């Protein structure tokens, strides 16, 4: 089983800062890029096709989406 910590909040709330600090304490803490389908800003995202997201949903690998 894989475990993790989900950091959630508005832009500029410090999620990246907390991730860097956690990684400095324990290298097992690494960022997991958010998945995005569609146009727009791509920086910080793992771009994917809707079919890829559907497959992840079917496997129970999507924990939150908006």
Image (cartoon, rainbow, N blue to C red):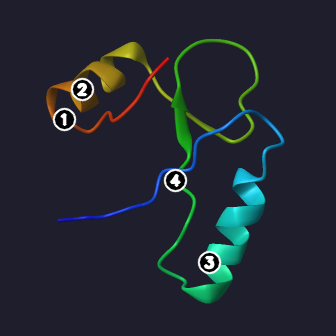
Badge 2 element: helix
Q: Earlier in the sequence, mark 4 or mark 3?
A: 3
Q: Which mark is residue 57?
A: 2
Q: Which mark is residue 32?
A: 4
Give percent across and percent down for residue 39: 67, 12
Q: Estimate how packed mark 1 is, as few (under 14), some (14 to 19) or many (20 or more) residues with alpha carbons within 10 Å.
A: few
Give percent across and percent down for residue 41: 76, 24
Q: Quadrant of residue 52?
A: top left
Eye-nearest disc, 4 or 3: 3
Q: Earlier in the sequence, mark 3 or mark 2?
A: 3
Q: Residue at 71%, 30% (x, y): give it.
A: 42
Q: Estimate how packed mark 4 is, as few (under 14), some (14 to 19) or many (20 or more) residues with alpha carbons within 10 Å.
A: few
Q: Are marks 2 and 1 in contact (CB under 8 Å)?
A: yes
Q: Quadrant of residue 10?
A: top right
Badge 3 element: helix
Badge 4 element: loop
Q: Estimate how packed mark 2 is, as few (under 14), some (14 to 19) or many (20 or more) residues with alpha carbons within 10 Å.
A: few
Q: Residue at 71%, 75% (x, y): give it.
A: 21
Return the residue at label 3: 23
- Give the alpha-carbon distance from disc 3 to disc 2, as whole Å: 28 Å
Say which of 9 and 53 sits in front: 9
- Give the alpha-carbon distance from disc 2 to disc 4, as whole Å: 17 Å
Q: Residue at 47%, 79% (x, y): give it.
A: 28
Q: Residue at 54%, 83% (x, y): give it.
A: 27
Return the residue at label 1: 60
- Give the alpha-carbon distance from disc 4 to disc 3, as whole Å: 12 Å
């Amino acid at each position: 089983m894989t475990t993790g910590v989900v950091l959630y909040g508005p832009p500029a709330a410090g999620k990246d800062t907390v991730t860097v600090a956690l990684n400095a304490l324990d290298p097992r803490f690494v960022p997991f890029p958010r998945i995005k389908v569609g146009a727009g800003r791509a920086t910080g995202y793992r771009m994917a096709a809707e079919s890829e997201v559907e497959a992840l949903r079917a496997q129970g690998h999507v924990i939150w989406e908006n």
